[in-house]
Image: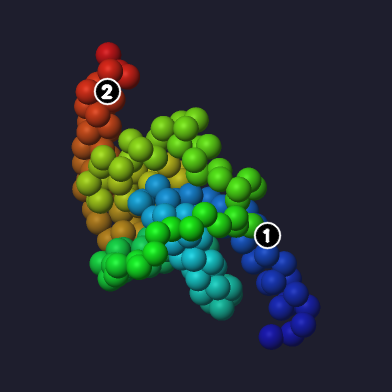
Amino acid sequence: MPDEVRLASDAEFSSFYRGTIRELTGFLINQGAALPVAADIAQDTMTKAYRRWTDIRQPRAWVHTVASRALIRRIADLREDPVGQLPEPTSLLAVTDPVTEWETQYDALRLLTVLPPRQRQVLAWTLNGFTPSEIAEHLGLTAEAVRASLKKARRTAAAHLRNRGELQ
């Protein structure tokens, strides 16, 4: 690859990385990953994206798909962690503990935890701006199945809020 083309490709990827890494990390947190796990998976996914950058046609969807699959593999291969999670500042997020701030402010993450895995996964994709058809394509589902999962997720969330007295 000529130097000019490589420089342009690197600049394009760099812009994509800066605009997507935080969103991708939040996407994984919405699917149930702890912040350190989400950050690791997001970074690994971006490394893979950089290596294949010239071949990827829909980079935003590609990184979400790869990251989501990596999280599922990590959850399926869950091993006991002999030490608890240690709070650790990260350069991916602006303040030391933005997840707690986000949880306190919006309470959305706690609501997501009551959903079954498939509903949570589909809702996480939706919260990141993907349509049911796009989600279906990237997860290998039908659009109807995605819409059904979204409907069930909304019902479950509404029931949870009603039980907590937050919804009439």
Q: Secondary structure at mark 2?
A: loop
Q: Is residue 131 above or below residue 18?
A: above
Task: Please tell me which residue is depicted at 21% across the width and 41% down the height of the picture.
Answer: 148
In the rendered image, is residue 57 in sight?
A: no
Q: Residue furthest bottom?
A: 1
Task: Please tell me which residue is depicted at 42% across the width and 42% down the height of the picture.
Answer: 127
Q: Is residue 67 above or below residue 107?
A: below
Which numbered disc, 1 or 2, marks the residue that appears first in the sequence?
Answer: 1
Tag 1: residue type? Ser
Label 1, label 2: how many angstroms apart (C-alpha)?
42 Å
In the rendered image, is residue 168 in sight?
A: yes
Q: Which mark is residue 15?
A: 1
Circle 2 is placed at which residue position?
164
Quarter of the image for residue 71 reads bottom left
Q: Is residue 82 above or below residue 3?
A: above
* Image quadrant in which the N terminus is located: bottom right
* Image quadrant in which the C terminus is located: top left
